[in-house]
Image (cartoon, rainbow, N blue to C red):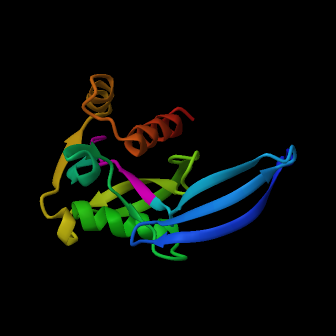
Amino acid sequence: MKQMNFKVLKSEILFKGKVFDLQVDEIEYDSGNKGIREVAVHNGGAVVVPVKDDGKIILVKQFRYPFQDFLLELPAGKLETDEDPEVCATRELTEETGYTAGTIVKLGKIYTTPGFCTEVLHIYLAQNLKSGNHNREEGEYGMEVYEFTLEEINGKIRNGEIVDAKTISGIYFYKLFNDK
């Protein structure tokens, strides 16, 4: 592995939040120049690609506050401290859609914004689904559940209806899984 060309002089958490903390590091490069790195420290999360027996993929539409818009997304949620990502994936699938998975397989992981954030999303395939009741959190009450074929989802990505990065990544992982 390549060696870093800097050392950390000072590191502190300036803000402790519910979703992430803000860490600011003062660094010094080998050249003597100094710099600042701001890092959003995040527990990460789990994303689920729920595929029904008929091949349809379940997406949810939910309001995303930073964009003041409704987005079509794969079910997902934030990891609790030291939580197993598969446990989180299973919980979020049921919480957001009402489905439980007979089988769940890890497809991969993504670094969502590696330039400034430590968030890692673990992506799972959920199959052999059984329907049931969802258990949404207060901020998810208006969430809607949809089912689409892979071709329909491809079209929605192409035409800009699906712009959520974890969803696009999850669908790509699913395609790779099927191309084995």
Q: Is residue 74 magenta?
A: no
> Is there any visible trace of residue 150 in the rendered image?
yes
Residue drawn at (55%, 49%) of the image: 111
Is residue 153 left or right of 29 when viewed as pictured? left
In this rendering, is residue 134 above or below 31?
below
Q: How many marks?
A: 0
Is residue 116 left or right of 4 when viewed as pictured? left
Residue drawn at (51%, 76%) of the image: 81
Quarter of the image where the C terminus is located: top right
Residue drawn at (29%, 35%) of the image: 162
In this rendering, is residue 100 above or below 106?
below
Q: Percent x, y for residue 5?
A: 84, 46
- The image quadrant of residue 70 is top left
- Of residues 4 and 14, the one nearer the viewer is 14
> Is there any visible trace of residue 100 in the rendered image?
no
- Of residues 96 and 100, the one nearer the viewer is 96
Q: Is residue 49 magenta?
A: yes
Residue interval drawn in magenta: 46-57
- Of residues 57 and 52, the one nearer the viewer is 57
The furthest residue to the front: 33
In this rendering, is residue 160 above or below 8?
above
Is residue 4 left or right of 26 when viewed as pictured? right
Is residue 134 left or right of 88 when viewed as pictured? left
- Of residues 9 and 57, the one nearer the viewer is 9
Q: Percent x, y for residue 95?
A: 26, 68
Residue drawn at (26%, 47%) of the image: 59
Q: Percent x, y for residue 57?
A: 30, 43
Q: Percent x, y for residue 52?
A: 29, 49
